[in-house]
Amino acid sequence: MGITRAIEVQLAAAQTYGTAKNMTAVTNAAEAVATLEASHGVVVGDYLELTSGWARLNGRIVRAKTVVTNDVTLEGINTSSTVRFPAGLGTGTVRKITPASGLIALSQVKLVATSGGEMGFEDMTTVDDVQGKEAPTIPGPTRLTLTCFDDPTLAWYAVLLAAADATTPLAFRMRFPNGVMLLLNAYVALSRFPQIEGGGMALKSTITLSLVADTTRYAS
């Protein structure tokens, strides 16, 4: 049994992105291969933000596994189902998070809380049924709420503030001590006024991340 513990959790956010590059084709495969324009500049290990005609791929943050000229393998992205990923409709663009080592660490985070994401259901009961029935629909929105010790002079605060003011999604990486890594793309909202508690408690601020696409998980 594998257990991932929420200790020594490392949070980081994208600081800068490269120019969007055309993704002219994406294969239906157990691990999708994207064909990019010749000037893509992607190398193995890069984190990429995708836009795609496939809703299940659109907005995802993924890692480049292999690069052969203009063909980039999207690590762990299974697009083999032509029902979920209709052939020929996955084209779009990629933006490289630059550089791959350029994520900025989020320090002074006291607590991470997750909410939402519960599966929705539609009542499928008909008049001749003797037992109620329901069918799953889609999950609701997922939010991460970060409670941080308040300090707007921290370098990462400016990065998140810019994303919040622009109302544009920002890529994040969450890494656990056993190597498990989550990549996510989210809108950012910051509380502009700190939480004030009595008894000499430190000021705290709240940051809300609202996910815009599926999370990508890697074992290391």
Image (cartoon, rainbow, N blue to C red):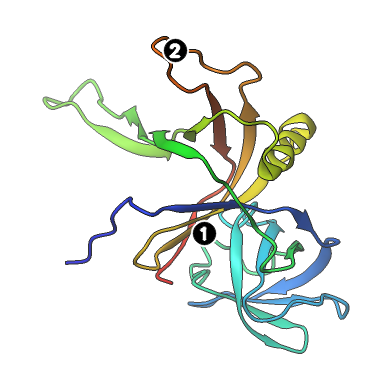
Give the amino acid at mark 2. Glu
Q: Nearer the viewer, residue 24 or 39?
A: 39
Q: Count the labels in the image.
A: 2
Closer to us: 88 or 26: 26
Identify the residue shown where x is 68% and y is 38%: 157
Q: Residue 112: percent from the left, percent from the top?
A: 42, 38
Q: Is residue 169 visible?
A: no
Q: Quadrant of residue 194?
A: top right
Residue 193 % position (x, y): 62, 16
**Residue reaching furthest front?**
200
Q: Helix, strand or loop at disc 1?
A: loop
* 191 sits left or right of 143 in the view: right
Observer-nearest residue: 54 or 147? 147
Residue 22 seen by the camera = yes
Can you tell which of label 2 and label 1 is closer to the viewer?
2
Can you say whether 94 is above or below 158 in the image?
Answer: below
The residue tagged 2 is: 197
Categorize mark 2 by other alpha carbons within 10 Å: few (<14), some (14-19), many (20+): few
Q: Residue 208 carries which label?
A: none
Q: What element carries label 2?
A: loop
Q: In this view, does 15 lie above or below 124?
A: below
Q: Quadrant of residue 98?
A: bottom right
Question: Mark number for residue 84?
Answer: 1
Q: Position of residue 43 (x, y in %)?
A: 71, 80
The N terminus appears in which quarter of the rendering? bottom left
**Direction from residue 7 to residue 60 in the image, left or right:** right
